[in-house]
Image (tube, rainbow, N blue to C red):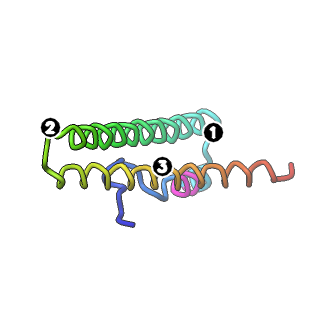
Amino acid sequence: MDNISKVYGIDSNAYETLVKRAKNNGVTGTQNNDMFQSLLNSAIDNINTTNAYLSNAENENIKFALGETENTHDLAIALRKAQTALQYTVAVRDKFLDAYKEIMNMQI
Protein backbone atom coordinates (compact mmCIF):
# COMPACT_ATOMS: atom_id res chain seq x y z
CA MET A 1 0.00 0.00 0.00
CA ASP A 2 1.22 3.48 -0.81
CA ASN A 3 2.17 5.93 1.90
CA ILE A 4 -1.01 7.97 2.32
CA SER A 5 0.04 9.91 5.39
CA LYS A 6 0.03 13.04 3.22
CA VAL A 7 -3.68 12.54 2.55
CA TYR A 8 -4.58 12.65 6.23
CA GLY A 9 -1.80 14.79 7.64
CA ILE A 10 -1.00 12.14 10.25
CA ASP A 11 2.14 10.10 10.56
CA SER A 12 1.56 6.36 10.84
CA ASN A 13 3.96 6.36 13.80
CA ALA A 14 2.29 9.31 15.54
CA TYR A 15 1.36 7.34 18.63
CA GLU A 16 4.88 5.98 19.14
CA THR A 17 6.35 9.44 18.57
CA LEU A 18 4.03 11.00 21.16
CA VAL A 19 4.82 8.30 23.71
CA LYS A 20 8.59 8.69 23.20
CA ARG A 21 8.32 12.45 23.56
CA ALA A 22 6.28 12.07 26.72
CA LYS A 23 8.82 9.72 28.27
CA ASN A 24 11.76 11.95 27.34
CA ASN A 25 10.17 15.17 28.55
CA GLY A 26 8.55 14.02 31.80
CA VAL A 27 5.06 14.94 30.64
CA THR A 28 2.51 16.09 33.21
CA GLY A 29 -1.17 15.14 33.33
CA THR A 30 -2.27 18.30 31.50
CA GLN A 31 0.20 17.66 28.72
CA ASN A 32 -1.03 14.07 28.47
CA ASN A 33 -4.57 15.37 28.03
CA ASP A 34 -3.39 17.75 25.30
CA MET A 35 -1.57 14.95 23.51
CA PHE A 36 -4.59 12.66 23.79
CA GLN A 37 -6.86 15.44 22.51
CA SER A 38 -4.53 16.00 19.55
CA LEU A 39 -4.45 12.29 18.76
CA LEU A 40 -8.23 12.05 19.11
CA ASN A 41 -8.73 15.02 16.78
CA SER A 42 -6.46 13.38 14.21
CA ALA A 43 -8.48 10.17 14.43
CA ILE A 44 -11.76 12.06 14.03
CA ASP A 45 -10.38 13.95 11.02
CA ASN A 46 -9.27 10.61 9.56
CA ILE A 47 -12.78 9.19 9.94
CA ASN A 48 -14.37 12.30 8.42
CA THR A 49 -11.99 12.20 5.46
CA THR A 50 -12.67 8.51 4.92
CA ASN A 51 -16.41 9.17 5.03
CA ALA A 52 -16.01 11.95 2.44
CA TYR A 53 -14.05 9.66 0.11
CA LEU A 54 -16.65 6.89 0.48
CA SER A 55 -19.47 9.34 -0.22
CA ASN A 56 -17.66 10.71 -3.27
CA ALA A 57 -17.08 7.18 -4.61
CA GLU A 58 -20.76 6.35 -4.14
CA ASN A 59 -21.79 9.55 -5.95
CA GLU A 60 -19.45 8.79 -8.86
CA ASN A 61 -20.81 5.24 -9.03
CA ILE A 62 -24.41 6.53 -9.13
CA LYS A 63 -23.54 9.07 -11.86
CA PHE A 64 -21.95 6.34 -13.94
CA ALA A 65 -24.88 3.94 -13.40
CA LEU A 66 -27.40 6.61 -14.41
CA GLY A 67 -25.42 7.46 -17.53
CA GLU A 68 -24.73 11.04 -16.42
CA THR A 69 -21.04 10.50 -17.05
CA GLU A 70 -19.00 8.15 -19.20
CA ASN A 71 -15.71 8.99 -17.55
CA THR A 72 -14.55 5.76 -15.96
CA HIS A 73 -11.28 7.37 -14.94
CA ASP A 74 -12.95 9.56 -12.30
CA LEU A 75 -14.95 6.58 -11.07
CA ALA A 76 -11.82 4.43 -10.75
CA ILE A 77 -9.95 7.18 -8.91
CA ALA A 78 -12.83 7.78 -6.49
CA LEU A 79 -13.18 4.06 -5.78
CA ARG A 80 -9.43 3.63 -5.22
CA LYS A 81 -9.27 6.64 -2.88
CA ALA A 82 -12.20 5.27 -0.89
CA GLN A 83 -10.68 1.80 -0.71
CA THR A 84 -7.28 3.10 0.39
CA ALA A 85 -8.79 5.48 2.95
CA LEU A 86 -10.92 2.70 4.41
CA GLN A 87 -7.93 0.34 4.64
CA TYR A 88 -5.92 3.04 6.38
CA THR A 89 -8.73 3.80 8.82
CA VAL A 90 -9.16 0.12 9.67
CA ALA A 91 -5.39 -0.23 10.21
CA VAL A 92 -5.36 2.77 12.56
CA ARG A 93 -8.37 1.40 14.43
CA ASP A 94 -6.64 -1.96 14.83
CA LYS A 95 -3.52 -0.27 16.23
CA PHE A 96 -5.63 1.69 18.73
CA LEU A 97 -7.39 -1.50 19.82
CA ASP A 98 -4.06 -3.30 20.21
CA ALA A 99 -2.75 -0.44 22.33
CA TYR A 100 -5.94 -0.44 24.43
CA LYS A 101 -5.70 -4.20 25.00
CA GLU A 102 -2.05 -3.86 25.99
CA ILE A 103 -2.88 -1.10 28.47
CA MET A 104 -5.74 -3.14 29.94
CA ASN A 105 -3.43 -6.13 30.43
CA MET A 106 -0.87 -4.10 32.38
CA GLN A 107 -0.68 -4.87 36.06
CA ILE A 108 -0.55 -1.95 38.44
Query: What's the CA distance linking mark 1 and mark 3?
Result: 30 Å
For label 2, the SS is loop
Residue stretch rendered in magenta on the structure? 15-20
- Count numbered badges in the picture: 3
Mark 1 touches mark 3? (CB < 8 Å): no
Q: Residues within 10 Å of mark 1 (few under 14, many from 20)?
A: few
| Amino acid type indicated by mark 3 | Thr
Residue at the right extreme of this rendering: 108
For label 1, the SS is loop
Query: What's the CA distance linking mark 2 and mark 1?
Result: 57 Å
| Amino acid type indicated by mark 2 | Glu
Q: Is residue 19 located in the magenta-colored stretch of the structure?
A: yes
Q: Nearer the viewer, mark 2 or mark 1?
A: 2
For label 3, the SS is helix
Q: Which residue is mark 3?
A: 89
Q: Which residue is mark 1?
A: 28
Q: Residue at x 52, y 51 (%)?
A: 90
Q: Residues within 10 Å of mark 2 (few under 14, many from 20)?
A: few
| Amino acid type indicated by mark 1 | Thr
* Residue closer to the observer: 69 or 49: 69
Q: Which residue is mark 2?
A: 68
6 horizontally vs 21: left or right: left
- Point out which mark residue 91 bears: none
Q: Main secondary structure of the magenta part?
A: helix
- Where residue 40 sits in the image (x, y, percent)? 52, 37
59 horizontally vs 1: left or right: left
